[in-house]
Structures are given as structure tokens and as C-alpha cells.
Amino acid sequence: MGRRSTSSTKSGKFMNPTDQARKEARKRELKKNKKQRMMVRTAVLKMKDPRQIIKDMEKLDEMEFNPVQQPLLNEKVLRDKRKKLRETFERIVRLYERENPDTYKELRKLELDYESNRGKLSLYFDSVKVSRAMETMGRKTTATLKRTVKERGMTEARLTRG
């Protein structure tokens, strides 16, 4: 995207000096507004606590990976919430990377610990799910075997009587 001259229109015609001044003033105002928006965003990010964001993500994980109780929220809702929290955390980390390298390192360590715990929780949840599936499959298999033996036993009894 190239920058357009303030002394001409889109079609290349010469602009009225009053319109030129208005266009330049608008350009300056937009630049000032952009700086203000960036300052507000930075201030909002500084107010947020990255440790609390990690705790919120851990709560979502506990809700999602609880083998005893079904999650109260839909899977998509949980995923969206986690994504939003993670994006906010990443913005905070990038901010601290520029402004405070010591805090940045601490936050990265906190993130690694969270990911490690999340992996363990996920692994545990998956293993419980698999063991329950195997248990259910085992019950069905045992019931099928008992039924088959019973049917065959009855058939063998009929053969020996006759």
C-alpha cells in the first residue's frame, strides 16, 4: 500500500488548499489516536495478572479432564475460552519480553509448568477413559462367552439324550 500525496485526489487531480489542510489534519489526528489506542492496550495488559490467567486455564483443564464428572460447559466453549486466555497470556508475555526480561523468564517457566501439568492431566484422563472402555468391552465379552457356552451346553445335552 503506497502513501498518497495530500495535494492530489485519488484520480490525480489537484486538491483545493482547504481540502489539503483538512486531509493533513485528519492524518495527524489518526496518528495521535493510534498512539492513544496503543497506550490504552498496554495499560490494560499491565493490569492483568498472568498468574491468574494460568489459574483460569488450569480450572478449565480440571473441568475438561475430570474423569468423574462431565464438564459443565460444551467442548467448543472450553476450547474458545482457553484460546482467548492463551492469546491474552501471550500478549502479556510479549509485553514483558520488551520491558522486563526477568519477569519474562519467570512467565515462560510458569507456562512450561502449566503445559507439563496439562499434559499429565490429559494423559491420566485418557488412560481412565481407555480403562473404562476396556472394562465395558470385557463385560460384554464375558456376557457373550457365558451365553455362547450356555447355548452350546444345551446343544450338547440334547445330543447326548438322543
Image (cartoon, grey):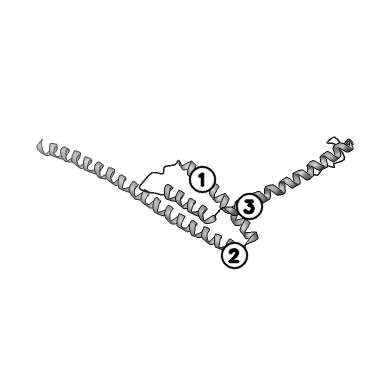
**Residues at marks 2 and 1, CA–CA distance in whole angstroms:** 28 Å
Front residue of 131 and 15: 15
Residue at figure coordinates x 36%, y 51% from the top left: 128
Of the residues tagged 2 and 1, which is closer to the observer?
A: 2
- Asked where in the image residue 155 lies, by quadrant, the reply is top left
Name the residue furthest bottom: 102
Q: Secondary structure at mark 3?
A: helix
Mark nearer the N terminus (3 vs 1): 3
Q: Quadrant of residue 7?
A: top right
Kind of element beneath mark 2: helix
**Are there few (<14), some (14-19), or many (20+) residues within 10 Å of tag 1?**
some
Residue drawn at 47 percent across, 58 percent down = 116
Q: Nearer the viewer, mark 3 or mark 1?
A: 3
Q: Is residue 79 left or right of residue 35?
A: left
Image-based side of 74 in relation to 35, left or right? left
Q: Is residue 1 visible?
A: no
Tell me which residue sits at (61%, 63%) in the image. 101
Q: CA distance from mark 3 to mark 1?
A: 22 Å
Q: Residues within 10 Å of mark 2 (few under 14, many from 20)?
A: few
Q: What is the three-letter code of the residue carrying label 1?
A: Lys
| Residue picked out by circle 2 | 102
Residue 61, percent across and down? 45, 50
The location of residue 18, given as percent across then percent down, is 87, 37
**Which mark is in front, 3 or 2?**
3
Q: Is tag 3's residue or tag 2's residue first in the polypeptide sequence?
A: 3
Q: Position of residue 150 (x, y in %)?
A: 18, 40
Q: What residue appears at the point 29 percent right and 47 percent down from the top-left corner? A: 138
* Count of marks overlaid on the render: 3
Give residue 81's mark: 1
Q: Which mark is residue 43?
A: 3
Q: Give the residue type that dot 2 points to.
A: Asp
Q: Quadrant of the C terminus?
A: top left
